[in-house]
Image: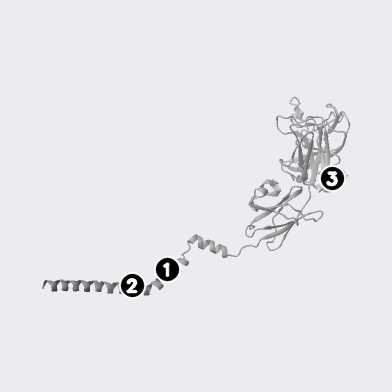
Amino acid sequence: MERECRLAGTATRGKVWLGRGVALLAWAWVSGCQAPEVGARAARDAATPTAPASSQADAAIATAPRAPALRGVVKDALTGAALRGARVSWVEASQFYLVDARDWESAFKGEGAVVTDGEGRFEIPAGVMSSKALVVTHPTYVPVEVTEFAPDAPVQVALQPGATVRGTVRGVPSRGLQLVLRNEDSRLTYEEGLIPVKEGGFEKVGVPPGNYVASVDGTSDAFATPDIPSQYLQLTPGETVTLDFKTWALLGVKKDGARLRVRCDNPAWRVPSLVLLPGRAPTPLDDSAYWKASYMSLRSNPPDPNSKAEVEGRVETFGPLLPGPYTLFVIDLDEGTLVAVQRADLKIPKRGVVEHIVRDDWLTPSQLAGDAGTRAE
């Protein structure tokens, strides 16, 4: 009886384990049938992840149409030869003012730049030229700004060769001296017009053509301005000019040498502006010409505080002056606007004082165009 009970228990447990085994086999069969589909779906999900919003935006930009690369060539304006090593920079057109600032250094610090190859060619990458200007520079040429160009056509840039100014300074130690170039058209910034004097000599290449006043000055207040007269020069493209600066003593002109005193005795007149230029200069016909001439004018001596007429501007003195022809313009200005002009062609001797009295003989703006040219002959 006991044996039958044990057998019955064993049979019962066997049925239970058999039932569990069948259930496991059924689960395994169902899982095996679904596994390929589940695995394939997982593989597809892994292969196509959901892109974040920023990546989708980048993809949209990448597929949008882009401006083509900008190509061009840089040549010598006189010979037409290709220029190698010219630097082509791109800057924001709204932030670069060539005419006003002439700040070429900003071109080198622009958003980017390329350099021309042996055939003068350059290429700017696509997509960087919208609302921008090109600034083209070369060590020995006059820089230019290009603001109008077609992206689908090559840019043709012609650089004008600059002049070379070199020379010597004699009669004073050269330590702490510099040559200062001033141009009537402001083609150089103040810093660009400074040329250091080393061992009695100086040189600067790539100077824009034009009319200049060249003077020797100290590099700082620690170095006094030498007693050397300024020189006027006219530079043409590619020209080399050699200047020789000497002290008044080496020139044989004494400190009490020739001077020019200009008197304006009529108290009813406004105090005029005086412009003194060496040689025979054309009469300024408008405000722009006056300001250019004024910038190039020789400077009068500081007024004598003991002389009321000098302090009031009724008498001005120029000198010492080198002997030769000079042109004096007496300008009547009303709030900076040219109202009338007097012209005097003078000849300065080696020594002595030349007196010039301003007369009531003015040319009005309406008369300047017809009469001033005749007087300039």
Which quadrant of the figure contains the C terminus? top right
Residue 107 in percent (x, y) is at: 67, 49
Where residue 372 is drawn, which disc sits there?
Answer: 3
**Residue in the foreground of this view, choosing between 19 and 169:** 19
Q: Residue furthest front?
A: 3
Among numbered discs 3 and 1, the one appearing first in the sequence: 1
Which of discs 2 and 1 lies nearer the camera? The answer is: 2
Residue 167 in percent (x, y) is at: 82, 38
Which of discs 3 and 1 lies nearer the camera? The answer is: 1
Which quadrant of the figure contains the N terminus? bottom left
Separation (CA) of disc 3 from disc 1: 94 Å
Residue 25 seen from this side: yes
Which element type, helix, strand or loop, lies under badge 2?
helix
**Residue in the foreground of this view, choosing between 256 and 283:** 256
Where residue 53 is drawn, which disc sits there?
Answer: none
Q: Quadrant of residue 77?
A: bottom right
Where residue 28 is drawn, which disc sits there?
Answer: 2
Q: 60 left or right of 42? A: right
Q: 56 left or right of 296? A: left
- Identity, as a three-letter code, of the amino acid under mark 3: Ala
**Residue in the foreground of this view, choosing between 13 and 300:** 13
Separation (CA) of disc 3 from disc 2: 114 Å
